[in-house]
Amino acid sequence: MKVLYISSRLNVPDGSSVHGRAFFNSVQKIGHEIVTYPEITPLPLVYTEKQVVNKNIIYFLRKFRPRTIIFWVRQINFRIADSIDFISGLFVSVKDFFKLRTIIKNFDPDIIVYRKYLFNFAVVWASRMYNVPCVAEVNSLKLVESKLRKNKKKLSTLSRWSETYPLLKSDHVFCVSSAIKRSLDTFLDPKKVSVIPNGVDADVFDRNRYNSENIKKSLGLQDKTVLGYAGSYQAWHDVQKSVDLISMIKDSDPSFHLLLIGNGQDYEKIARHIEEQDLASYVTQIDYVPHTEMPKYLAAFDIAIMTYPIFDGFYFSPLKMYEYMAMAIPVVSTDIGQIRDAIDDGNTGLLVKQPTVVEFMNAIFSITKVKGRLDEMGGNARRAAIEKHSWVVNASQVMDLCSMILNSRDRSEN
């Protein structure tokens, strides 16, 4: 099968590019032809060092961007900001359409798989003009995401239409969680929507490639039982609960240590909380690690913790969860959403029904206080990652879906 894969964030260093690049590689691995738009290029390096700069008028002029205007306009009137985004999206759509037209004429794909993004309609225009079926990949919906943010009521009619229109025109839609499917089912035929969760490259995320004790030593964590979290510091991750957890655990067993990897809106708040609680000797914060380096750091984890609060609209299929599992790390998580479908409670990790600090502590001790249980659960987690949650499994499911669509179209034309 010849596949044209479209994702605007293939060359942006975040989870979107991880997913897109892994899908590209896996589709090739299982024997299909695939090209991408845009073409895949080396990811830019991201530096987090803070440099002293002279903040004069030149500095602020260089920092000035149209997106900055839209951000501040959105604070005043989100409808005007959405209108600006829509007009900009139309211009980009026209530009992308002509580029896609060239690719389709040269490559002659059997099917288009594209990652849904707002205010861009080039894919469905090209799909209809050249009679190439298209399948949408949905990792989040503004309809759902906006409920988790402070401006949850600020979703305009234009935004809603721009998000739903391409999906309505697609031949099929697949999404990463059941929660997103439930939202899609409100305006799409449920038979047109499938759930295909995120995955992991189990060859890259393999604990056997690393010496965990040496890595712990390099981080100053030798002889520690490391509880780990990697990801953003968004409010819904409740990273502070992880800090409160280590504060309680250390009183029972001071050999435990919390390793936090990532950054985000609450990073400085958490850093202050650690200082105020005098926990600096029990918590290590690393604010950025390139994804290519992440397996090395995860090899220092003994147990991964995901301390989500219980809330409506939980739609995530966390990439890090599958990466933990592939690294043979038992996951202790709140029992919520797609997580309960991925974690086999008591076998590959533990699900906490009531996400309190005490319940998380009890779950962690139930693993570490039983001889051999940590290694057993870690081994089970890795096997599950390989057999059920690899990117190859993910790509195979998407390709099976594409074959079904092509076969259905052939039958209808005959």
Image (cartoon, grey):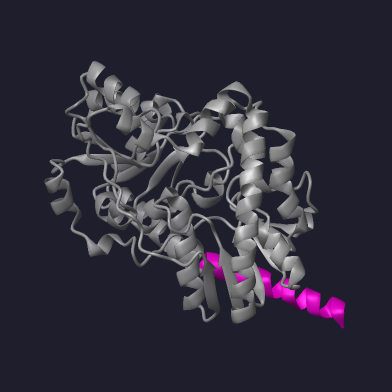
- Nearer to us in this view, 195 or 60: 60
Does residue 275 show up magenta in the picture? no
Report the side of 92 relative to 260 (left or right).
right
User: Residue 28: image x %, image y %?
Assistant: 49, 76
Q: Residue at x 49, y 31 (%)?
A: 236
**302 to the left or right of 254:** right
- Tell me which residue sits at (47%, 67%) in the image: 39
Which of these two is toward me, 199 or 328?
199
Q: Is residue 225 above or below residue 249?
A: below
Compared to residue 43, the image places residue 311 above or below, namely above
Residue 396 among those drawn in magenta: yes
Majority SS type along the magenta span: helix
Q: Residue at the front extreme?
A: 58
Left or right: 345 as drawn, with respect to 263: right
View extreme (top): residue: 276
Number of numbered discs visible in the structure rendering: 0
Image coords of residue 109 (percent x, y): 63, 77
Foreground of the two, 46 or 372:
46
* Residues shaded magenta: 393-414
In what quadrant of the picture does the C terminus appear? bottom right
The image position of residue 145, as x and y in percent, is 59, 37
**What residue appears at the point 60 percent right and 61 percent down from the top-left corner?**
96
